[in-house]
Image: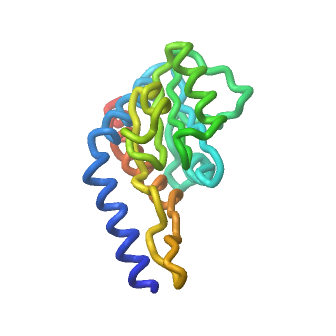
Amino acid sequence: MLKMLSTQVGGLLQRVATNQEEAIEESARLLAQAGVGDGVVYFACFDELQAIEINALNAAEPYKKLRPWTKDVEIVDLDRVCIFTRHANHSDALALAHTLYDNFIPFAVVAGEKVEDAGEMADLAYTYISLGINKGLLPNELGERIVLPHTIAALFIYEAIKMSYDEMLSGL
């Protein structure tokens, strides 16, 4: 079972790397707009994807110019936001997307659905990255699909964004 899990997770990350490369690069560029200027980068992470913000703030190599996001934070036009959510229709994530969009603040989204299935969230976002997870990776004894590694895929995307972001900021 462990070998199957390893194979499936490896395949998932390879698909993300292949299918989302351009969106990852665009998202890094978007966030770098705040990083190179006077703005702040916020990660608005929902449910289990709060692990992304914890990692970004407390890792051995923290994300530069990142500040914790809460509902009380006042985001200005110099700031940039990346929303991490398991589902594109998450009510709090979608409410934040509407607020940002209405205030002309470009933002990125990382969510489970493919862009064509993300609906309103993908329409509002400046960039949209799919986690590529719409069902479990492995079948169980009952034939149900289990193992939904949203956090693993999101951390992989985070690291890919961070590599590009850090490279863009390295010349400063």
- Total marks drawn? 0
Seen at 53% across and 33% down, the residue is 65
Name the one closer to the observer, 160 or 9: 9
Residue 27 picture location, percent across and down: 38, 35
**Colour scheme employed for the rendering of this structure:** rainbow
Name the one closer to the observer, 7 or 172: 7
Residue 140 picture location, percent across and down: 51, 80
Residue 168 picture location, percent across and down: 33, 34
Say which quarter of the image contains residue 116: top left
Judge from the rendering whether residue 80 lies leftward or rightward of residue 3; answer left or right. Answer: right
Seen at 52% across and 73% down, the residue is 144
Judge from the rendering whether residue 14 lies leftward or rightward of residue 59; answer left or right. Answer: left
Seen at 52% across and 71% down, the residue is 146
Seen at 47% across and 61% down, the residue is 135
Q: Is residue 167 above or below residue 99?
A: below
**Outermost residue, front side:** 142
**Which quadrant: the C terminus?**
top left
Q: Is residue 13 above or below residue 31?
A: below
Residue 67 picture location, percent across and down: 61, 35
**Outermost residue, right side:** 72
Say which quarter of the image contains residue 117: top left
Q: Is residue 121 above or below residue 135?
A: above
**Which quadrant: the N terminus?**
bottom left
Name the one closer to the observer, 17 or 69: 17
Judge from the rendering whether residue 156 lies leftward or rightward of residue 140; answer left or right. Answer: left
Say which quarter of the image contains residue 8: bottom left
